[in-house]
Image (tube, rainbow, N blue to C red):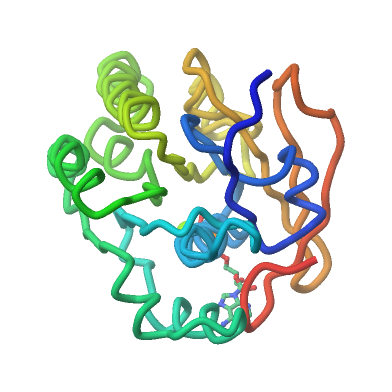
C-alpha cells in the first residue's frame, strides 16, 4: 500500500492505530454513540491539517460541514492555542458551512470542486454525514431510498478525496441500544455507512472520564487493535 500524506489526530496512540493519522484520498468514518468524541476529533483535525508537515499536518486549510449545529469556534480557539498556533489565523483557515438538510449538504459538497483547489483545502469534514438523511427518511420503510441517497453522497465525497488529494472525515452516530434499530445497518451498533465504499472505519467508545477507545473495523491493511486517547480542554491527546 502506497504511503499517503496523513493528518495527526493529536494522539500518538490513535495515530499509530490509523497507520500515522487520517489519510488523504480516503474517507475516514468515525462512528460511535453520543459523547464518544466524534465532533471533538473533527474539530481537532480541522486545526491539525493546518500544521506544517513536520508537525503532522498538511499546511492546508479545512472545510467543516456541520449538519447538527455542534461546531464551536471556541473549541477551535482552544485547540489552536494548545498547539501554539495563532487562533485567529487558524479560524480563518476553516471554511464553516451549516448544512440545513440533505439536499443542501449534497449541494455544498458539489460546490467544493471549486473551493478546494482555489483555497488549498486539505480536509473536508462532514459531521454528521447521516443525521439529515435519517431525519428525512426515517425507519426501516425508507431504508432503501435513504441508503441510495447516502451512497450518492459518499460517492461525491470519494470523488473529491481522489481528485484533490484531500482527506475526507465523516461521522456517524450509532445507538447504544441496537435492539431498537435492529435491521438497519447504519444505526445498529457496530454499524457504519461505509459498508460498500472504500475507506477506513473507526469505532469510538466511551471509557472512564475523558478517556475514549478507538478500534478499526474491517481494514485488512491496519491492525485489529484498540487505541486509548483523551479529550482534554486543549483537544485530543494521549
Ligand atoms: P454526538 O453523537 O452526540 O454528536 P460526539 O461523538 O460528537 O457525540 P463529542 O461532542 O465529540 O461527541 O464529545 C463530547 C465530549 O467531549 C464531552 O462529553 C466532553 O467529555 C468532551 N469535551 C467537549 N468539550 C470539552 C472541553 N472544552 N474540554 C474537555 N472536554 C470536552
Ligand atoms: Mg457530535
Where in the image, quadrant-wise, is ligand 1 located? bottom right
Q: Which residue is drawn at 51% across and 18% down?
A: 198
Could you tell me residue 106's position as x and y percent? 19, 36
Question: 115 or 177, which lies in front?
Answer: 115
Question: 83 or 200, which lies in front?
Answer: 83
Q: Residue at x 52, y 31 (%)?
A: 181
Q: Residue at x 51, y 81 (%)?
A: 85
- Can you name the residue that lies furthest to the right here? 225
Could you tell me residue 232's position as x and y percent? 68, 78
Could you tell me residue 95's position as x and y percent? 26, 62
Left or right of 88 on screen, residue 21: right
Left or right of 163 on screen, residue 100: left
Q: Quadrant of the C terminus?
A: bottom right
Question: 191 or 104, which lies in front?
Answer: 104
Q: Is residue 207 above or below residue 92?
A: above
Could you tell me residue 24's position as x and y percent? 50, 37
Q: In which quarter of the image is residue 130?
A: top left
Q: Is residue 194 above or below residue 230?
A: above
For the image, the number of numbered tags is 0
Amino acid at each position: 500500500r502506497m504511503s499517503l500524506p496523513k493528518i495527526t489526530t493529536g494522539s500518538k496512540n490513535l495515530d499509530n492505530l490509523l497507520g500515522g493519522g487520517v489519510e488523504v484520498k480516503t474517507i475516514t468514518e468515525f462512528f460511535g454513540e453520543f459523547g464518544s468524541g466524534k465532533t471533538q476529533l473533527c474539530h481537532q483535525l480541522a486545526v491539525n491539517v493546518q500544521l506544517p508537515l513536520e508537525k503532522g499536518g498538511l499546511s492546508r486549510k479545512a472545510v467543516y460541514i456541520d449538519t447538527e449545529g455542534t461546531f464551536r469556534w471556541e473549541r477551535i480557539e482552544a485547540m489552536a492555542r494548545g498547539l501554539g498556533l495563532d487562533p485567529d489565523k487558524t479560524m480563518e483557515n476553516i471554511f464553516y458551512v451549516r448544512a440545513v438538510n440533505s439536499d443542501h449538504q449534497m449541494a455544498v459538497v458539489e460546490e467544493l470542486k471549486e473551493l478546494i483547489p482555489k483555497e488549498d483545502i486539505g480536509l473536508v469534514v462532514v459531521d454528521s454525514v447521516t443525521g439529515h438523511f435519517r431525519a428525512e427518511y426515517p425507519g426501516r420503510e425508507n431504508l432503501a431510498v435513504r441508503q441510495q441517497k447516502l451512497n450518492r453522497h459518499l460517492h461525491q465525497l470519494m470523488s473529491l478525496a481522489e481528485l484533490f488529494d484531500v482527506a475526507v472525515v465523516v461521522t456517524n452516530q450509532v445507538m447504544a441500544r441496537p435492539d431498537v434499530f435492529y435491521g438497519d445497518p447504519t444505526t445498529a451498533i457496530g454499524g457504519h455507512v461505509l459498508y460498500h465504499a472504500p475507506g477506513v472505519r473507526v469505532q469510538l467508545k466511551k471509557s472512564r472520564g475523558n478517556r475514549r477507545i478507538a478500534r478499526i473495523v474491517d481494514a485488512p491493511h491496519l491492525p485489529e487493535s484498540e487505541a486509548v486517547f483523551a479529550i482534554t480542554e486543549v483537544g485530543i491527546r494521549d
